[in-house]
Each structure stands twice: as structure tokens, then as C-alpha cells.
Image (cartoon, coloured by chain):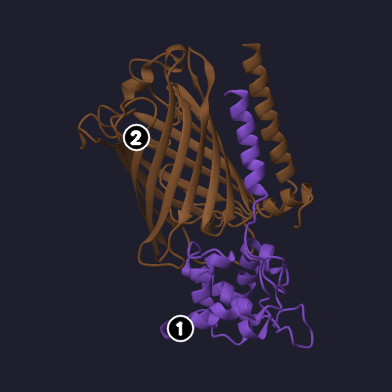
Chain colours: A brown, B purple
């Protein structure tokens, strides 16, 4: 146990150091409000987006939980964004544990804007069975899966590959996106599992105002997202699956912070009744060049 | 998380951060403006609907500062990553051409697509860019009134 505490402290020390280093850089954010769905916009090249998200979930047949994750999203090129997640959760009346990490990559497939813009999403996850961030819902994920005590759930170790095709379009201010999901847990003989996420959003004002302001309508983007499981290779469909509908809103502050809020509601008896999510993020431009300088490279 | 995982994570962050992000643009390299010539005729002939909007340039300047100055320089004179927007190639382009380029980006050269900005805001940006005094002008550094 002391060794685990030391590792968690070391990890958070590295994260804080990165944030302090990045705080010296300029920041420009224009973030979408989605928390589960993705549109086709990638991180700007050389920029680092640091994000923190929380999910409070109700749990029938068990204790409610607060899951949280930190994301480091980096624009490697204009067509490739790579991202690392670190996950954890607190189950009330149980314990707080680290639950794993994810490495996600998104590749823009077409150079220019088209009627629909496809982006290929590939993710590797190394998580425990106690992971509760519900960043995506797939297969036959249902509420009762999350009622297992942490001490038991964390004994399960998953190595999962996840593929998404992000199909997104922005028209007259509206963004509409659809993300079919296919995942494969490479530990054991688990079948391919499927899921979906869809979303629509729009800024509250399309025309910007000349002054910098916090409460201007153009700083707010509102919308809705819906996500759920579609079974697996052997039992594809909606039976024994969970689904959620979640209004989403993002507030892009001129001080370069973005706040997001999303109350998600379960749509059937297999779903958590409420998933209340919120997040805060900041984008740091020129992060890649700054790191390169730090290691003696050419800016 | 095992110690090995933590090390992999750290190396990943540092390694990817130091990766070559994009081919550098030089304001003197005329080929960086070649994309402008690829705009379809239909796009180049579009008129800026905010041409007579007195606030469009000021608002465009704010948007430029937020989204563009990091690469193209605070005065649009060109930076390490983005070319000068005061160059003749840009200033002689039609508003429709600039709008098309903003919308589609030049992804392989590191310029992202900006269709995530609403169309009106992209036109506000075009208004600002077209208001800049060309690099060959007498007082480089200040936009025209």
C-alpha cells in the first residue's frame, strides 16, 4: 500500500508540474460541448489541451459513485491528435482508487471539408473492472455491472482496443455527429462489442462581438448527446443494453478556460438513472515547441 | 498503475510533444500560398456579407488574436508556423478565396480547418485580413481604418 501511495503521489506531481509548465504558454480555446461524442475537429498542431472531468452516477443495488479523469490532448499534426487519459473513482461508502489509463489517437482521413467528415479513432485502454468513467457505453454494459465492490472489481484487468468512426458535419452553426463504436477486450476470449454516440450542438450566437466578454452568447455552445450499447458479435441489438440522453453545454471563457456541464439521464431500466458530468479544460498553444526547446531542440 | 506504466506514460507525453508537429512555413516561400489558387470558382466569387458591417474588422481582429496570431504573428506578419497574411498573394485574393481557405484549412501543411467557427465569424476574420496593409505598403504593422 505505501508503494501505491508513492506512485499516485509521483503521478500527480508529474501532472501538476506539466500544468505549471504549460501555464506559461498562451492559450486559445474553442471547445465543443460534447463529453462522450466527438466531432471531427482535432487539436491544433503543437497545442496541448489539459482537461479534468467528473461523473457523479447514481447506482441502484449499490453505492453511488464519483468517477473522474484527466486528459492530456495534444495536436501532433493538423490531421493527428493523440491523447492520454488517467482514470480514477470514488465509490461512496467504499474506497477511492486509480482505475487505469487510456491512449487515444484520432486521424483525419480527408484533407478538406466535405459533406460528412470522417475521422478514425483508435484507443488502447488498460483499466481495471472498477473503472466507472463511462466515457463510452458499449456491448451489454448495464447498471448492475457497476454495483460490484471496488475490492472485487479492481481484480479484473482489461486490455481493450477501441475503434470509432467519427462522422461529423457543421452546417449553419449546427454541428451534427455520429460515432459508431467497436471494441475488443484482448484479454480472454471476449467478443467484439458495439456501441454508438450521437450529438448535435450549436453556439448560442453565430456572430462574435467586438469586445472580449465572459457572458456573450457566442461563448456558449449548447446541444444534446445520446449514447449507448448495441450488443456484441453474438447478440447484436438493443436487448440488455443501456442508453443515455444528455443535454450538454460548454462555456468558452476569453481567459481560455472552458467549462462543460451535462446531466445525463438513463433511458431504460438497465441504465443509471442519472450521470451528472462536468469538466474544466484549458488549451495551451505552442506546447510542442516549448517542450522541444526544453530538450534543446529547435523551436 | 505499475511503475513501468507510469514510465511509459511519461515517455509518451514527452515523446509525442517533441515530435515534429508540422512542416515549417516560411513567409518567403511562395509555395505556401499555392493553396489559394486551388479554391473552386464558385467559392472565389462569394462576396463577404459583412463588407459594410462597421464592426466586422474590429471583431475579426479579436478573433484573429484568439485563434490565428499564435501561428501567423500578432500583426499577421507571419510566424514560425504560419505565413504572412500581409503578402500580396493573400491581399490580392478575393474574400471568397480566403473564406474557402479558412473553412478547409491546409491540413497537410499544418493549418487546421476552421469550420468550427460559425460562418459569420469566418467572414469577420476575412474582413480583418482584408483590412491589413500589404507587406509592401508604406506603414506595415497597422490595419487600415
Q: Which mark is residue A115?
A: none
Rendered-image quadrant of the N terminus of chain B: top right
Rendered-image quadrant of the C terminus of chain B: bottom right
Could you tell me residue B54's position as x and y percent? 59, 79
Q: Quadrant of residue B130?
A: bottom right
Could you tell me residue A173's position as x and y percent? 42, 63
- SS state under label 2: strand
Q: Quadrant of residue B59?
A: bottom right
Residue at (44% x, 40% y) in the render: A262
Could you tell me residue A141's position as x and y percent? 32, 29
Question: In this view of the protein, can residue A97 be seen by the observer?
Answer: yes
Quick one: B54 or A6, which is closer to the camera? A6
Question: In this view of the protein, can residue A35 be seen by the observer?
Answer: no
Category of crowding for the residue at label 1, using alpha-carbon neighbours closer than 10 angstroms: few (below 14), some (14–19), many (at least 20):
some
Quick one: B108 or B64, which is closer to the camera? B108
Quick one: A13 or B9, which is closer to the camera? B9
Residue at (62% x, 79% y) in the render: B31
Query: Above or below — where is B109 with respect to A289?
Result: below
Closest to the camera, between mark 1 and mark 2, is 1
Category of crowding for the residue at label 2, using alpha-carbon neighbours closer than 10 angstroms: few (below 14), some (14–19), many (at least 20):
some
Could you tell me residue A14's position as x and y percent? 69, 33
Q: Name the chain under label 2.
A: A
Residue for badge 2: A265
Residue at (65% x, 15% y) in the render: A3
On screen, residue A132 versus residue A259, left or right, reads: left
- SS state under label 1: loop
What is the CA distance from the residue labelled 1 to the residue labelled 2?
44 Å
Query: Above or below — where is A213 with respect to B34?
Result: above
Query: Above or below — where is B77 with respect to A62?
Result: below
Q: Name the chain under label 1.
A: B
Residue for badge 1: B46
On screen, residue A142 versus residue B23, left or right, reads: left
Amino acid at each position: 500500500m505505501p508503494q501505491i501511495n508513492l506512485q499516485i503521489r509521483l503521478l500527480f506531481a508529474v501532472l501538476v508540474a506539466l500544468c505549471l509548465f504549460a501555464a506559461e504558454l498562451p492559450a486559445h480555446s474553442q471547445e465543443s460541448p460534447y463529453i462522450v461524442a466527438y466531432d471531427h475537429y482535432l487539436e491544433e498542431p503543437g497545442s496541448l489541451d489539459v482537461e479534468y472531468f467528473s461523473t457523479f452516477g447514481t447506482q441502484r443495488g449499490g453505492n453511488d459513485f464519483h468517477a473522474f479523469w484527466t486528459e492530456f490532448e495534444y495536436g501532433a499534426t493538423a490531421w493527428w491528435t493523440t491523447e492520454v487519459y488517467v482514470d480514477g473513482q470514488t465509490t461512496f461508502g467504499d474506497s477511492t482508487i486509480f482505475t487505469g489509463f487510456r491512449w487515444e489517437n484520432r486521424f483525419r482521413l480527408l484533407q478538406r471539408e466535405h459533406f460528412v467528415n470522417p475521422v478514425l479513432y483508435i484507443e488502447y485502454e488498460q483499466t481495471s473492472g472498477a473503472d466507472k468513467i463511462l466515457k463510452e457505453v458499449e456491448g451489454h454494459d448495464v447498471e448492475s455491472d457497476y454495483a460490484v465492490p471496488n475490492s472485487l472489481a479492481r481484480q479484473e484487468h482489461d486490455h481493450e482496443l477501441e475503434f470509432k468512426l467519427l462522422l461529423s458535419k457543421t452546417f449553419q452553426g449546427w454541428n451534427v455527429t455520429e460515432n459508431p463504436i467497436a471494441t475488443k477486450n484482448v484479454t480472454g476470449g471476449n467478443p467484439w462489442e458495439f456501441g454508438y454516440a450521437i450529438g448535435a450542438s450549436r453556439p448560442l450566437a453565430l456572430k462574435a462581438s467586438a469586445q472580449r466578454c465572459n457572458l456573450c452568447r457566442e461563448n456558449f455552445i449548447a446541444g444534446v448527446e445520446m449514447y449507448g450499447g448495441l450488443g456484441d458479435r453474438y447478440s447484436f441489438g438493443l436487448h440488455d443494453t443501456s442508453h443515455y440522453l444528455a443535454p450538454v453545454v460548454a462555456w468558452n471563457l476569453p481567459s481560455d478556460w472552458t467549462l462543460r456541464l451535462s446531466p445525463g439521464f438513463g433511458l431504460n431500466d438497465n441504465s443509471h438513472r442519472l450521470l451528472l458530468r462536468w469538466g474544466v479544460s484549458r488549451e495551451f498553444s505552442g506546447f510542442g515547441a516549448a517542450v522541444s526547446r526544453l530538450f534543446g531542440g529547435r523551436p | 498503475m505499475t511503475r513501468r506504466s507510469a514510465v511509459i506514460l511519461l515517455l509518451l507525453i514527452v515523446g509525442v510533444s517533441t515530435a515534429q508537429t508540422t512542416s515549417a512555413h516560411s513567409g518567403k516561400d511562395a509555395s505556401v500560398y499555392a493553396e489559394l489558387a486551388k479554391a473552386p470558382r464558385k467559392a472565389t466569387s462569394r462576396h463577404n456579407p459583412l463588407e459594410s458591417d462597421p464592426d466586422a474588422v474590429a471583431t475579426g481582429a479579436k478573433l484573429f488574436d484568439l485563434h490565428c496570431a499564435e501561428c501567423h504573428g500578432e500583426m499577421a506578419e507571419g510566424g514560425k508556423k504560419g505565413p504572412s497574411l500581409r503578402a500580396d498573394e493573400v491581399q490580392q485574393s478575393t474574400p471568397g478565396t480566403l473564406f474557402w481557405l479558412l473553412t478547409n484549412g491546409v491540413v497537410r501543411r499544418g493549418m487546421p480547418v476552421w469550420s468550427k467557427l460559425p460562418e459569420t465569424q469566418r467572414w469577420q476574420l476575412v474582413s480583418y485580413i482584408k483590412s491589413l496593409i500589404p507587406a509592401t505598403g508604406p506603414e506595415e504593422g497597422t490595419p487600415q481604418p
